[in-house]
Image (cartoon, helix red, strand yellow):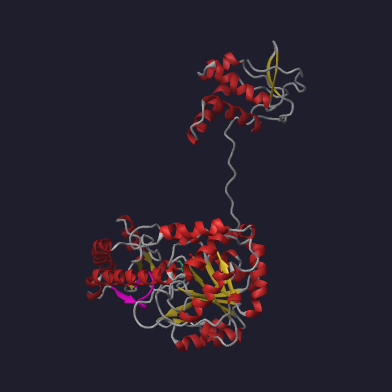
Amino acid sequence: MVPMTAAAPAILPRVTPPSPTMLSEYLLAEMARAGEAAELPLHRRLYEALRRALLDGKLVAGDRLPSSRDLAHDLALSRNTVVAALGQLTVEGYLVSHVGSGTYVHDHVPQRATRQWAPMAVPAARLSARGEALTQRHRASDLEIQPFVPGAADFSAFPVALWQRLQNKHWRAAYPEMLDYNDSGGYGPLRRAVADYLRVFRSVRLDADQVLITSGTQQSLELCAHLLADHGDTVWLEDPAYWGAVKAFTATGLAIHPVAVDDEGIAPGEADEQRPPRLIYVTPSHQYPTGAVMSLARRQQLLASASRCNAWVLEDDYDSEFRFSGPPISSLEGLDEEGRVLYMGTFSKVLYPGLKLGYLVVPKTLVHAFKQAHYDLNRPGQMPLQAALAEFIEMGHFASALRRARQTYAERRQLLVDALAPVLSSGVGRIHGAAQGLHLCLRLPGHADDRAIAAQAAREGLTVRPLSAYCLQRQDLRGLAIGYGYAAPEAIQRHGAQLCELLGKTASCSSK
Ligand SMILES: Cc1ncc(COP(=O)(O)O)c(C=O)c1O
């Protein structure tokens, strides 16, 4: 039986109570819904359905409920089930029961002037203007992990056992401060290891103190945007552009001004300087997605332009570790005499993206402000993880992982180039950009419908991205970004032939 309480219902029904049939129908529908969401026992589903009726105003203060016997009959439930549900609602104060009189809705439950038996209208999910802009166009979820997805690396060779040992060691040794937020820009030995690496291999001129450990490039970009630009300020972006940068600057309220990229990288002209930027975002070592390497002349031109406009330059060096021929391309930062380049990199490619660690090198004059804002905005931590990574680098494991990965990706790129030979020799496509990174850019004739080709490839289980989808403003680029990092050699050969066949059909069709 429903427990009894001494208090009489303080408020008697003022609006017509629901008929037992309406109530039963409602409860049955709600119980079915609750059952879909989780494997709840029946008394719990009935409890949820009744509680919803109480909260939504379908049952109001003073309503008398049907008897547990009638409810059990109408809902085809056992009486025990009904009693359990009513009992729980009584304990929680929604219902009150009186010997010989029945069970009522407690007067704590709000009275309502009317009852809504139609399903409650769910408010439309209204996003802010910024939210709308952020959810347009490229999405991370478009990057479905299938053969040829651009940018994805192969983590199968990652030394998991060694990584686990290092992590255990640093967890065992972790002193309490290691478990706290960190306000000094990251774990000291890791910042030193990153500085040493960048000085030697990327010609970046820096002290360890200028290195901030971030949760990856997205966070580095957002920090720069928050600290160096105001809402509505202009940022120059390469066109075509890395979608992650588009998102970061959209989220921080900057006005994006696209500047076209050609074979030598970004090429700002006088007209662009009419829209003077606060920030300029570039990928000079391997433009994403065209693969162009920025020439020395262009680097000097860009730095001069930044100087005239008094802009900061954000250099995203996301995959320059994987250069397969010739010496490494030095950083743009290394040419900067005015201290206006902020350099950023990531461990996502050489190690694994879920590690969520990257680095940002800021000019000395900005170190204090960046450390402080990084702490206030992001509450960085993960010190044991950073300590494990520092040791991983110090012991030479990072260098060997890099060597192995470079070798693997060089072979895979060559396999892909070989597999695409029919498309290349027929003149349908040509490879654009440097032999570097985890993807290649296959340029197609201007009339090719690269989106239709990518859509057809997706239907056949391949993820390639149309170049036109990366374009912000320009209409002239057609092609595909094709990743080779993730696919195993035999898959590259097999799917390469498949892609070739598809390109043979679709690209030549769309050129007619
Ligand atoms: C140009 C560019 N920058 C940065 C990243 C990723 O950096 P993170 O994983 O550190 O956010 C990518 C990933 O593909 C990229 O293409």
Asked if the magenta segment contains residue 217, the reply would be no
Asked if the magenta segment contains residue 440, the reply would be yes
Rendered-image quadrant of the N terminus:
top right
Among all residues in the image, which is located at the extreme top? Answer: 100
Q: Is residue 176 above or below residue 415?
A: above
Residue 320, percent from left and from top: 43, 75
Residue 41, percent from left and from top: 51, 27
State the image quarter where residue 48 is shown. Answer: top right
Side of 251 where 471 appears, left or right = left
Residue 120 visible somewhere in the drawing: yes
For the point 30% across and 62% down, the residue is: 488
Q: Is residue 335 above or below residue 283?
A: below
Q: How many marks?
A: 0
- Residue span colored magenta: 429-441
Rendered-image quadrant of the C terminus:
bottom left
Residue 28, percent from left and from top: 52, 25
Q: Is residue 295 above or below residue 353?
A: below
Please state which of residues 375 and 317 is positioned toward the viewer in this rendering. Answer: 375
Residue 512 visible somewhere in the drawing: no
Please state which of residues 96 and 258 is positioned toward the viewer in this rendering. Answer: 96
Residue 143, percent from left and from top: 42, 59
State the image quarter where residue 95 is shown. Answer: top right
State the image quarter where residue 437 is shown. Answer: bottom left
